[in-house]
Image (cartoon, rainbow, N blue to C red):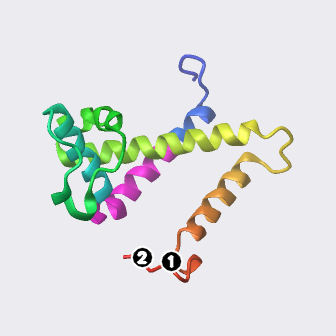
Amino acid sequence: MAIAGLSGRRLLWPIVLALVAVVLYDTSIKRRGMVDFGVYRVAAGRALAAETLYREDDGHYKFKYLPAFAFAMAPFAWLEASTAKALWFGLSVGLLAALLRWSIWAIPRRRRSPTVLIVLTLRTSRAATRPRACPGVRLP
């Protein structure tokens, strides 16, 4: 049964992606603390309160972006921290998936199926972010 012109096949990938994102967030991302997101959220709260965004006492976790980004993050400052983090992660995964899909469909003459290209892209990006890929760099 189609819903507003969407077939079950077209709905399958968003549902699978959502489930993978939930599992990934719950098992891995949530435990890491999402420190960078905390910087964005604090800056948004400061922007809404008309306080100084750039403070020396923030140490390594200073806000280093344009002030407009702090205002763009304002909706996340109004939410509870755990809800805001989950929503930010979900939006990030969704936008990354959309970018990947649009990029693959923009290839004029694909010689591989979209599924193969997505798997290869994810495997390559995962391998590139491992510490051993950059032997001279020490990651925390």
Residue under label 2? 139
Q: Secondary structure at mark 1?
A: helix
Q: Which residues are magenta?
A: 15-34
Q: Position of residue 127 (x, y in %)?
A: 59, 70
Graded by Cα atoms within 10 Å as few (under 14), some (14 to 19) or many (20 or more), the crowding at tag 1 reads few
Q: Residue at x 53, y 20 (%)?
A: 3
**Is residue 21 something one can see in this rendering?**
yes
Image quarter (top left, top right, bottom left or bottom right) of the N terminus? top right
Query: Above or below — where is 18 with respect to 20?
Result: above
Secondary structure character of the magenta stretch overall: helix
Can residue 52 be found in the magenta stretch? Answer: no
Q: Which residue is mark 1?
A: 131
Residue 106 at what x, y percent from top left?
74, 36
Residue 102 falls left or right of residue 23: right
Whether residues under marks 2 and 1 lie with C-beta atoms below 8 angstroms apart, the answer is yes
Q: Splitting the image into 4 quarters, where does residue 61 fall?
A: bottom left
Asked whether residue 21 is drawn in magenta, I would say: yes
Q: Which mark is residue 33?
A: none
Residue 121 placement: quadrant: bottom right
The residue nearer to you, when weighing 5 against 58, is: 58
Q: CA distance from mark 2 to mark 1?
A: 7 Å
Q: Considering only vertical position in the picture, is 77 above or below 2? A: below
Q: Is residue 53 left or right of residue 65?
A: left
